[in-house]
Image (cartoon, rainbow, N blue to C red):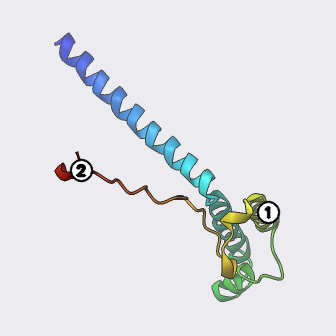
Amino acid sequence: MRITCEREEMRKLAAVRRHLSIGCLLFAWLCANGALWNVVQVVAWAKMFHDYSATMTTAEALELTFDASKPCKLCCLAKSAEDTARKQLPREAVLGGGVEKLLLIAECAPAVVVPGPDFI
């Protein structure tokens, strides 16, 4: 009975470790892609909508939440952080049209030439 309990505890511990690893990997990926600032922006919009909806109608709250002329502190933080991240990108990473992409493959694979039996 004791061995079964220990195995069950080990399975639970492995599941927790796996979920923690996946969560940390997801967080690192969000940070590396700059998507973390998009999450901050969404949280800012949710907070603004919550605050506005306490004192006005839903339509007015939505209109003020997405009004670009009245950003909150979190909106300003997310915008300035995204701008700073864009400025730090290497020049080769910025493509035309304002779209930013990183060039992942720089060279083509070299052609492999194998001599036939007549060559020897």
Disc ID at residue 14: none
Q: Position of residue 97 (x, y in %)?
A: 67, 82
Q: Position of residue 29 (x, y in %)?
A: 55, 51
Task: Find numbered disc 2 in the image and state the secondary structure of the residue it sits on.
Answer: helix
Q: Position of residue 96 (x, y in %)?
A: 67, 79
- Say which amino acid is labelled 2: Phe
Q: Residues within 10 Å of mark 1 (few under 14, many from 20)?
A: few
Is 8 positioned to the left or the right of 55 in the image?
left
Is 55 positioned to the left or the right of 110 in the image?
right
Q: Which quadrant of the rendered structure holds the C terminus?
A: top left
Task: Identify the residue under disc 1.
Answer: 87
Task: Find numbered disc 1 in the image and state the secondary structure of the residue it sits on.
Answer: helix
State the residue at coordinates (80%, 60%).
84
Q: Residues within 10 Å of mark 2 (few under 14, many from 20)?
A: few
Find the distance from the CA under tag 2 to the CA under tag 1. Answer: 55 Å
Q: Nearer the viewer, residue 9 or 30?
A: 30
Q: Nearer the viewer, residue 87 or 120?
A: 120
| Disc nearer the start of the sequence (2/1) | 1
Q: Position of residue 117 (x, y in %)?
A: 17, 49
Task: Identify the residue under disc 2.
Answer: 119
State the residue at coordinates (25%, 24%).
8
Q: Which quadrant of the rendered structure holds the N terminus?
A: top left
State the residue at coordinates (72%, 78%).
65
82 up-or-down from 23: above or below? below
- Say which amino acid is labelled 1: Lys
Name the residue furthest top. 2
Classify residue 104 by image quadrant: bottom right
